Image: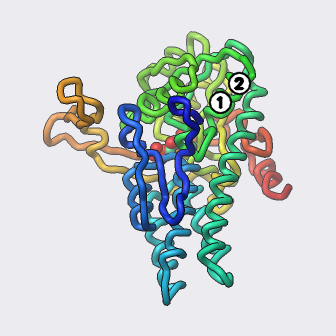
Amino acid sequence: MQVQGTHYRTVWMDGNTVKMINQLLLPHKFEIIELPTHLHTAKAIKDMVVRGAGAIGASAGFAMAQAFIEAEKEIKEYVDAARKHIEMTRPTAQNLFYATKRVYDAAINSENPKNIALNEAQKIADEDVSNCKKIGEHGNKLIKDGFKIETHCNAGWLAFVDWGSALAPVYCAKQKGKKVFVYVDETRPRCQGAMLTSWELLNEGIEHRIIPDNAGAHYMSQGIDMMIVGADRIAANGDTANKIGTFEKAVVAKEFGIPFYVAAPTTTFDPECRTGKDIPIECRCEDEVLYATGLSDTTGKISRVRIAPKGARALNPAFDVTPAKYITGIITEKGIIKPDSNEIKRLFNE
Ligand code: MRU
């Protein structure tokens, strides 16, 4: 995708160094961060310098490749420990575990593990791009000229290597000359909607408005044509974990008969999770709720301010699970499927 006329991926590898857009500074500052070792890359995932299922997955794949490159004598011992370390960074996004496993399995018993690991990690990143582009093409077929679409959190190109999942159909529709308006849920507490989705849509020249998280039902009651969200992990029965607040939107969408679509590549499906109850939900630190972070008008610096009274406590689950019965369809790179176990099984047996 374009940033002021230059094409960028969210994360890429340059030699043995991982490079990524520092999402902690967006939308106020555009900066590329360089991560020379797997420990640096793992920390960037943990600290949410990079976030979103696909981007986390590609970064984790690159981190795993860095570990193979770094390993000297006791290769297995070193990369096993590295894999454990990378997998501890964030628990919910399935793409992370998909990528570490895929790079590890490809390289561990090979003759040339460093090259194989690097190639495999690169393949994961490239496939992420082509999968998301296909999601865009399939999803575009659902969008009519003049559609009003609501989205939650950021499942745009910043959440993947390029294109995105939930926003890919919007970008594709725009390229086909359709006019689309997007309601962007601000997505407290990290405000991925207000900070990242809005920034992407501005870059792409797509008309949108940021709405408070609690304004969804109000606008749906006035007429929204469809809702598209991303996914962090999809269970075998179609239950879908996505950013906290998604479940509530899906329930309200059903009340108003608004089609509710999940967009995700097959790398986000986890057949090991039978239902949404098996998906681990990340709980993050209380401060994300008790404080707000943004650009200060007075100092011109990114800073945080306390919202809640001193001594107040908070709960901060990062994701929730939308039961399959609220989901109209899942837009994947292989086509649009119903969220049920038979269709999901068929997706993997093709
Ligand atoms: O906590 P984050 O920012 O890594 O959350 C992930 C997300 O961006 C959302 O849940 C998104 O809607 C799905 S990930 C493509």
Tag 1 and tag 2, C-beta contact below 8 Å: no
Residue 165 x %, y %: 63, 39
Residue 242 in sight here: no
Pick the quarter of the image with the N terminus.
Answer: top right
The image quarter containing residue 182 is top right
Left or right: 57 in relation to 296: right
The quarter holding residue 306 reads top left
Taking the image as shown, residue 285 lies to the left or right of residue 141, namely left
Report x, y in % for residue 330. Answer: 71, 40
Please tell me the numbered disc located at residue 251: none
The image shows residue 246 at horizontal and vertical percentages of 52, 35
Decide: is 14 above or below 77.
above
Q: Residue pushed farthest top?
A: 222
Q: Which residue is mark 1?
A: 260
In the rendered view, would you say 271 is above or below 179? below
Q: Residue at x 44, y 55 (%)?
A: 45
> Could one spot residue 158 in this view of the protein?
yes
Which kind of residue does numbered mark 1 sit on?
Phe
Q: Secondary structure at mark 1?
A: strand
The nearer-to-camera label among 1 and 2 is: 2
Q: Position of residue 24 (x, y in %)?
A: 37, 43
- N-terminal of the two: label 1 or label 2? 2
Quadrant containing the C terminus in the rendered view: bottom right
**Crowdedness near tag 2: few (<14), some (14–19) or many (≥20) residues, C-alpha within 10 Å:** few
**Circle number at residue 175:** 2
- At a point 48% along the width and 62% down the height, the residue shown is 17
- Residue at the extreme right: 350
